[in-house]
Amino acid sequence: MRPKTFPVRLHRRQRLNKKFYLLTFTVAEPETITFQPGQYLSLKIAANKRNSYSITSLPDQKRHLQICVDVSPSGPGSQFLKTTPLGTEIEALAPLGQFTLSHEERPALFVATGSGISPFRPMITQKLKEFPHQSVHLYWGIRFSEDLFWEQYWQNLETSFDQFKATICLSQPDGAWERTKGRVTAIIDKDFAQLADWEAYLCGNGTMVNDVRQLLIQKGMKSERIYTERFF
Amino acid sequence: MADDAKAKKKKYTIKVDRDKCIGAASCVGVAPGTFKLDDQNKAVIVSQTGDTPENILLSAQSCPTNAIILTDEKGNQVWPAK
């Protein structure tokens, strides 16, 4: 679908934790929105300013769009999305981007840091539905346990799909954290001896994307099967 | 002048800052006659008049890193806005 501009209304603003908000927009009739999991939208937050956000809702919700936003940078986008009254009409441009699923029947790694998890909710859900017998592993790196959200969502997917596994890695865990500690690169290096038959989707800070990409190639993954989206 | 040619009359000079480009490809989606991604996943210009000026401006505005620079016929930078 060719991207187009259309009005959306801010319908709901949900605080997930200190850093992250989930925002829901409605798409006014007669517009509908069609997108591929992994694509993003651009919101006009001021006369001369647009910000880009990965779409985190599922594509079958044709009249709603959701984005997950890290407001800790406190830039104009964060301020706008935190304070704009519900019901405000905003110009959106969507769908954008080429960070989409390969639709190949192959086991897949999904690796994210921070808000890079946003596109993975629709992407992983779609991947599991499309190929229910292929392994899908998610590695999500965040700093602190208080940054965590959507834990229940990933647990529900693990319950519904035997071949799905989610590993949350804290790089600065507090004493109470008993699960995986460290950076995603090191954890993946430890967990896999080789990845020749796999594909991977990497989303998050540029350093992680570069480091993990290099690691995966060293483990035998073909470079053309590594799909990346760098946040900045 | 035919409508199509009129619509795509050159209004902007387009440049891409490769150092800023992260291959997000919003420009390719909005103005596919103007941009494509090369083999390093960076945006390159296919044609300076591949799309209407309105779509070219929108493609520049949609770039998440402001890697697309537009100047007008007088050499004034139109986008990113100064």
Image (cartoon, rainbow, N blue to C red):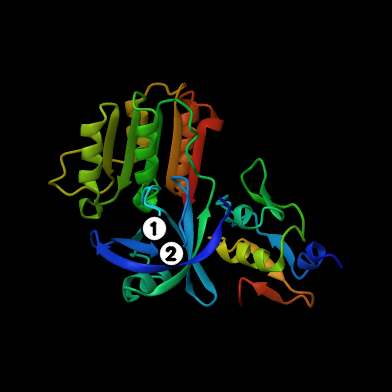
Whether residue A208 is visible to the viewer of this picture, yes or no, is: no
Residue A105: image x %, image y %? 45, 25
Residue A180: image x %, image y %? 23, 38
- Mark 1 vs mark 2: same chain? yes
Left or right, residue B42 beside residue A131: right
Q: Which residue is mark 2?
A: A29
- Disc 1 and disc 2: Cα gap in Å? 8 Å
Q: Which mark is residue A63?
A: 1
Q: Secondary structure at mark 2?
A: loop
* Chain under numbered label 1: A
Q: Nearer the viewer, mark 1 or mark 2?
A: 2
Please tell me how many numbered marks the rendered image carries: 2
Quadrant assignment, res A156? top left
Q: Is residue A98 above or below residue A40?
A: above
Q: Amino acid at mark 2?
A: Glu
Q: Residue at x 31, y 73 (%)?
A: A86
Q: Which mark is residue A103?
A: none
Circle 1: is it few (<14), some (14-19), or many (20+) Cα within 10 Å?
Answer: some
* Chain under numbered label 2: A
Whether residue A138 is visible to the viewer of this picture, yes or no, is: yes
- The answer to which of marks 1 and 2 sits earlier in the sequence is 2
Q: Residue at x 24, y 44 (%)?
A: A153
Q: Secondary structure at mark 1?
A: loop
Q: Amino acid at mark 1?
A: Arg
Q: Is residue A161 above or below residue A168?
A: above
Left or right, residue A87 beside residue A172: right
Pointer 1 with pointer 2, Cβ within 8 A: yes
Residue A157: image x %, image y %? 25, 37
Residue A72: image x %, image y %? 33, 64
